């Protein structure tokens, strides 16, 4: 008799879980229809067209850089410049880890 009650309880739990899963599936399926696809949202976004035009303007500015006057590098003053940089000797970085055993 106890085994029969346990079997019914297990079946009740399985049926309850199955009903909950069906309700959740129905709820997600129903709520999913209201969402607009991402692809159409990106294609119709006017902000993306503005960004695209800004990128094209920057590209045009970069293409104009090849027309720079490089005569500066042939200037005698520029060629007389000297490198006065100082070599820095390597120094230990930080300190020893006090937690290393």
Image (cartoon, rainbow, N blue to C red):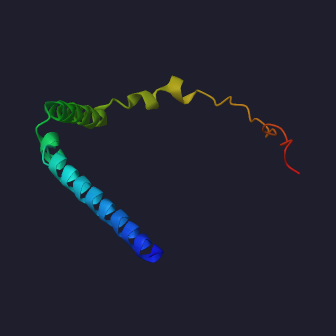
Q: Quadrant of residue 5?
A: bottom left
Q: Residue at x 18, y 49 (%)?
A: 32
In front of the other: 52 or 30 = 30
Quadrant of residue 7 within the rendered picture:
bottom left
Above or below, 97 relative to 21: above
| Residue in front for this viewpoint, 80 or 37 | 37
Residue 69, image quadrant: top left
Task: Identify whether 68 is placed above or below 25.
Answer: above
Residue 44 in percent (x, y) is at 10, 38
Q: Is residue 46 left or right of residue 91?
A: left
Whether 26 is drawn above or below 87: the answer is below
Q: Is residue 14 left or right of residue 54?
A: right
Picture mark count = 0
User: In the image, is 92 to the left or to the right of 43?
Assistant: right
Residue 9, position as x, y percentages in the image:
39, 66
- Which quadrant holds the N terminus? bottom left
Residue 57 percent location from the top left of the image: 21, 31
Residue closest to the far front: 1
**Is 42 left, or right, of 6 in this rendering?**
left
Q: Residue at x 22, y 34 (%)?
A: 60
Farthest-out residue, right? 101
Residue 29, given in percent of the width and then of the height, sits at 18, 53
Q: Nearer the viewer, residue 50 or 88?
A: 50
């Amino acid at each position: 008799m106890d085994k029969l009650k346990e079997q019914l309880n297990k079946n009740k739990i399985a049926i309850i879980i199955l009903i909950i899963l069906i309700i959740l599936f129905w709820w997600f399926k129903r709520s999913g229809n209201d969402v607009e696809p991402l692809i159409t949202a990106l294609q119709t976004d006017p902000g993306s067209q503005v960004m695209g035009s800004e990128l094209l303007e920057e590209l045009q500015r970069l293409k104009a850089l090849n027309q720079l006057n490089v005569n500066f590098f042939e200037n005698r003053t520029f060629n007389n410049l000297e490198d006065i940089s100082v070599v820095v000797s390597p120094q230990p970085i930080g300190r020893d880890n006090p937690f290393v055993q």
